[in-house]
């Protein structure tokens, strides 16, 4: 596997696993919250598989990703209510960009938190971008074995929310995906900035 997400950008939208994952994640999102009228941040949006679906219902979406090539693919889709940018989140950079100023009603992170170097730091930065009472939702691969170092457990997610001051709403096995690599469970974590 390449170290750079840029290398996956061209084929991302035709990857059947990516398409399936974003469809099911979107369905689970809509079961949990009504998107109408919401200002949403899609963190680690990739080429915007989930962004596009959210944008059809929400008021606006800011879509950010650290990979310039992923963002280039999304920008070329020209979705009228999506503002996309290649951006590395940090406390300082949040204050520098006016796009983040109003805060978000909802932040989604679909299959990204398990790939960042410091999950709790990202969570505490994202918390700064949530309005009071705003909702954070993530989907991530569940660890197959306790001693794996990739993916999350319910406990890791629950503890991280508590450590950064997000109020846990729920963490659950939401769906599973079967590919040539086998069947993997996906955890959905939901918290509020209450
Ligand atoms: C598995 S892909 C998921 C993309 C998209 N959410 C989807 O479901 O198709 C992980 C994405 O997270 C992005 N990413 C990884 N680390 C990041 C970070 N620190 N900040 C923003 N995006 C990041 C990658 O560039 C990549 O596009």
Image (tube, grey):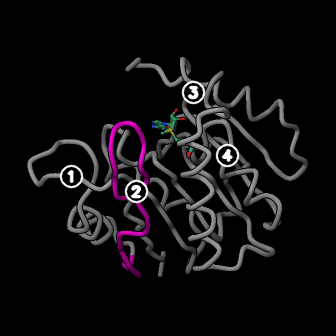
Task: Tell me what residue is drawn at x 57 percent, y 61 percent.
Answer: 24
Q: Seen in the image, is 76 located left or right of residue 166? A: right
Mark 2: few/some/many CA within 10 Å (<14, 14-19, 20+): some
Mark 1: few/some/many CA within 10 Å (<14, 14-19, 20+): some
- Main secondary structure of the magenta stretch: strand
Mark 2 vs mark 4: give the one in front: 4
Q: Is the Cβ of the residue at disc 2 closer than 8 Å to that at disc 3?
A: no
Residue corresponding to mark 4: 49
Q: Seen in the image, is 151 located left or right of residue 126? A: left
Residue corresponding to mark 3: 67
What is the secondary structure assignment of the residue under circle 1?
Answer: loop
Q: Is the Cβ of the residue at disc 3 closer than 8 Å to that at disc 1?
A: no
Q: Position of residue 161 (x, y in %)?
A: 33, 68
Mark 3 vs mark 4: give the one in front: 4
Disc with the residue nearer the chain's start (2 vs 4): 4
Residue corresponding to mark 1: 144
Residue corresponding to mark 2: 123
Up-down: is 12 above or below 165? Answer: above
């Amino acid at each position: 596997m390449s170290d750079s997400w840029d290398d996956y950008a061209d084929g991302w939208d035709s990857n059947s696993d990516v398409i399936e994952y974003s469809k099911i994640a979107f369905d689970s999102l809509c079961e949990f919250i009504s998107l109408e009228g919401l200002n949403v941040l899609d963190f680690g949006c990739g080429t915007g598989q989930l962004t596009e679906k959210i944008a059809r219902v929400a008021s606006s979406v800011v879509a950010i990703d650290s990979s310039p090539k992923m963002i280039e693919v999304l920008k070329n889709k020209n979705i009228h209510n999506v503002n996309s940018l290649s951006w590395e989140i940090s406390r300082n950079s949040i204050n520098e960009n006016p796009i983040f100023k109003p805060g978000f009603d909802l932040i989604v992170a679909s299959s990204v938190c398990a790939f960042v170097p410091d999950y709790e730091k990202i969570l505490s930065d994202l918390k700064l971008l949530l309005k009071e009472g705003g909702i954070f939702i993530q989907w991530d691969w569940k660890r197959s074995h306790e001693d794996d170092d990739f993916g999350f457990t319910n406990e890791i997610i629950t503890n991280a929310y508590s450590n950064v001051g997000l109020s846990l709403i729920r963490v659950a096995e939401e769906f599973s995906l079967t590919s040539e690599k086998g069947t993997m469970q996906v955890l959905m974590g939901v918290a509020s900035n209450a």
